[in-house]
């Protein structure tokens, strides 16, 4: 999913239905594949607002100007050579094989998760959750579902952490976090740590100077040796099908159970 599409969806979800921002976001999403051919005046006319209102909206989306905004559209399925997107990896797999085959892949990965997750690392993360007062959990797209799932499950158990859908707000939090903060990152490929995944140019990230404790939950076991990661909990895929959106909640349940044991002892 491209950066513009992702940010428009966030505005749509976060805005009041009667607000100007909601109206503009909905109109742009409804005409998404036309944006790259339109001038700012045509976009303003389409949305029935002024050009200055569109300019302000574009800045709210964290684009410097209309040219940068326009360059982020239209949505290109494999804009950055990343083939593990939903349509390419899951929808097409089901079309070419079957729903039964897809479900079998999920069951196989769930079984692998049950057998191979390093529970000592899960317990270590649970101890972090007890000792750190300030905790954040982040991810992008389907991986953010893991972050939100963890937030909700911890809240049921009296531990309140933060998350954020906005990719730039996530980066800002991480880059400015002090030693008193624990940051849990969900990233199936592990690329969240290494590059700006939603950016067209996939610019590199450097977390070497980050002061916060960084925990990564990933399907990429190679990230266990990454210098910017303090603790890596990895799982495996037994096929090319990416099942991480289903695996994350299972791992979160393991984390919660260990957290509950520790907090009950206290």
Image (cartoon, grey):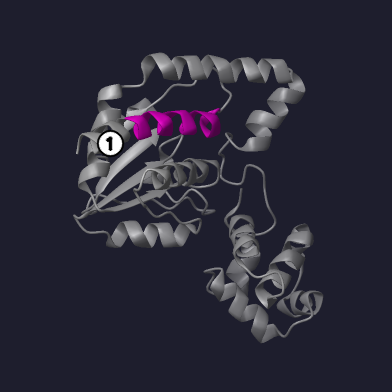
265 left or right, relative to 24: left
Q: Residues within 10 Å of mark 1 (few under 14, many from 20)?
A: many
- Vertical position of residue 37 compared to residue 164: above or below: below
The location of residue 160, given as percent across then percent down, is 36, 52
- Vertical position of residue 111 compared to residue 253: above or below: above
Q: Quadrant of residue 35?
A: bottom right
- Please state which of residues 189 and 182 is positioned toward the viewer in this rendering: 182
Q: Residue at x 56, y 68 (%)?
A: 61
User: Does residue 265 belong to the magenta stretch?
Assistant: no
Helix, strand or loop status at disc 1: helix
User: Does residue 250 belong to the magenta stretch?
Assistant: yes
120 left or right, relative to 100: left
Where, quadrant-wise, is the C terminus in this rendering? top left
- Please state which of residues 263 and 57 is positioned toward the viewer in this rendering: 263
- Vertical position of residue 86 compared to residue 13: above or below: above
- Vertical position of residue 21 compared to residue 252: above or below: below
Total label count? 1
Q: Quadrant of residue 174?
A: bottom left
Q: Residue at x 70, y 56 (%)?
A: 74
- State whether residue 106 appears in this view: yes
The location of residue 93, given as percent across then percent down, is 69, 24
The location of residue 234, given as percent across then percent down, is 37, 27
Region rendered in magenta: 243-257
Q: Quadrant of residue 98?
A: top right
Q: Residue at x 39, y 58 (%)?
A: 171
Kindly report the secondary structure that dominates the magenta region of the rendered protein. helix
- Please state which of residues 59 and 78 is positioned toward the viewer in this rendering: 59
The residue pinned by badge 1 equals 126
């Amino acid at each position: 999913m491209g950066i513009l599409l992702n940010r428009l969806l966030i505005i749509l979800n976060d805005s009041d239905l009667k607000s100007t921002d909601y109206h503009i976001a909905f109109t742009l999403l409804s005409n998404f594949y036309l944006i790259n051919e339109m001038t700012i005046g045509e976009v303003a006319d389409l949305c029935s607002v002024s050009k200055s209102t569109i300019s302000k909206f574009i800045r709210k989306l964290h684009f410097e100007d209309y040219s940068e905004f326009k360059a982020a559209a239209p949505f290109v399925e494999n804009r950055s050579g990343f083939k593990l997107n939903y349509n390419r990896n899951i929808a097409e797999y089901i079309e070419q094989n079957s729903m039964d085959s897809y479900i079998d892949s999920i069951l196989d990965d769930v079984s692998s998760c049950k057998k191979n997750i390093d529970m000592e690392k899960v317990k270590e993360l649970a101890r972090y959750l007890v000792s750190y007062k300030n905790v954040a959990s982040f991810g992008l797209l389907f991986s953010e579902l893991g972050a939100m799932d963890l937030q909700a499950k911890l809240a049921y158990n009296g531990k309140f952490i933060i998350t954020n859908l906005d990719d730039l707000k996530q980066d800002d939090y991480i880059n400015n976090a002090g030693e008193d903060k624990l940051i849990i990152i969900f990233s199936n490929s592990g690329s969240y740590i290494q590059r700006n995944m939603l950016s067209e140019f996939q610019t590199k990230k450097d977390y070497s100077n980050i002061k916060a404790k960084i925990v990564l939950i990933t399907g990429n076991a190679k990230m266990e040796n990454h210098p910017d990661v303090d603790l890596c909990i990895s799982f495996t895929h037994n096929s090319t099908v990416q099942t991480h959106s289903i695996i994350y909640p299972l791992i979160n349940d393991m984390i919660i159970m260990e957290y509950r044991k520790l907090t009950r002892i206290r």
